[in-house]
Amino acid sequence: MRLRNKHYEIDMLNGPVMPKLLSFALPLMLSSMLQLTFNAADVIVVGRFEGDAALAAVGAPGPLINLLVNLFLGLSVGANVVVAQCRGAGDYQQTRDAVHTSVAMSLISGVLVGVVGFFLAGTFLGLMNTPGEVLPLATAYMRIYFLGMPANMLYNFGAAILRAVGDTRRPLAYLTIAGVANVLLNLLFVIAFGMGVSGVALATIISQMISAALVLLCLMRSDGAIKLELKKLRLDMVKVGQIAKVGLPAGLQGMVFSLANIVVQSAINSLGATVMAASSAFR
């Protein structure tokens, strides 16, 4: 078991840096590209089989979703840094505390964002000048999407923990499996079941649950300091502070870009469903 886990980890403290840097960075780059295909798959399937209003409904909530999510995704960056620092210092107990605090924060963050997004979806979309013919579909898509937010956060924080020990290959593998599932479920729900916008949203959250389950099992089956034990999940307030110190600035930076995109999207929404659909297809 130990040898298998070590095979995925990268020791950045010893030996030549460049080969290790490439081995770490390339899967990370591919993971970022793959995450973009989740929404792209929704757009392609809906645009092909459901028409302009549905396509506009899938694209319209994007900037708003990013605004609500980016703050907490910034915290996953903080979790990555804190776990890596503890691991690099060779402090077994501090690493374990950071891992369990990070996972607990992911679940709390996911529930919080999910509740806010679910109940305020219609209000937020209305403030963004979403046309009447698009608003019900966009609201349904956004509400279903936010039901999967705990899984979304769990994957991102779990992947951050694995990256902290140099493992970027397994998060990429899990995301690839989830991406394939997303595409297949999109086709099943939209073409076979005729579920439209709700179908692509449901496919997205199921795929997010798959990636979250895989990364959770990976952490639970790991050995050493990053091994996750569910009964030991808790918030260590010292670690929460350390994670927030790094993660909040990163999250706020992401929110600033999202705010700018919301302003642009609001202007696009005011031009009607056809223009919204064109914008969604372009993105």
Image: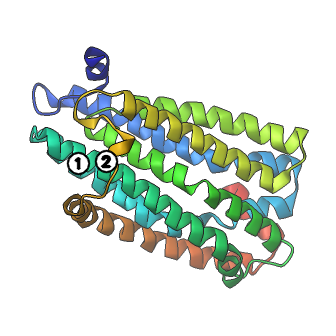
**Is residue 279 toward the left or the right of residue 16 in the image?**
right
User: Total marks drawn?
Assistant: 2
User: Is label 1 in a helix, a strand or a loop?
Assistant: helix
Q: How is the image coloured?
A: rainbow
| Residue drawn at 61 percent across, 53 percent down | 148
Residue that numbered label 1 is attached to: 97
> Nearest the camera: 169 or 276?
169
Q: Amino acid at mark 1?
A: Asp
Q: Quadrant of residue 138?
A: bottom right
**Is residue 44 toward the left or the right of residue 127 in the image?**
right
Residue that numbered label 2 is attached to: 100
Q: Quadrant of the C terminus?
A: bottom right
Q: Is residue 194 above or below residue 57?
A: above
Q: Is residue 227 above or below residue 140?
A: above
Instruction: Tell me the distance, in whole angstroms, between the alpha carbons under discs 1 and 2.
Output: 5 Å
Where residue 244 appears, x then y in whole percent? 28, 65
Where residue 246 appears, x then y in whole percent? 25, 62
Q: Quadrant of the N terminus?
A: top left
Where residue 16 appears, x then y in whole percent? 13, 26
> Nearest the camera: 52 or 14?
14
How packed is label 2: few (under 14 Cα within 10 Å), some, or many (20 or more)?
A: many
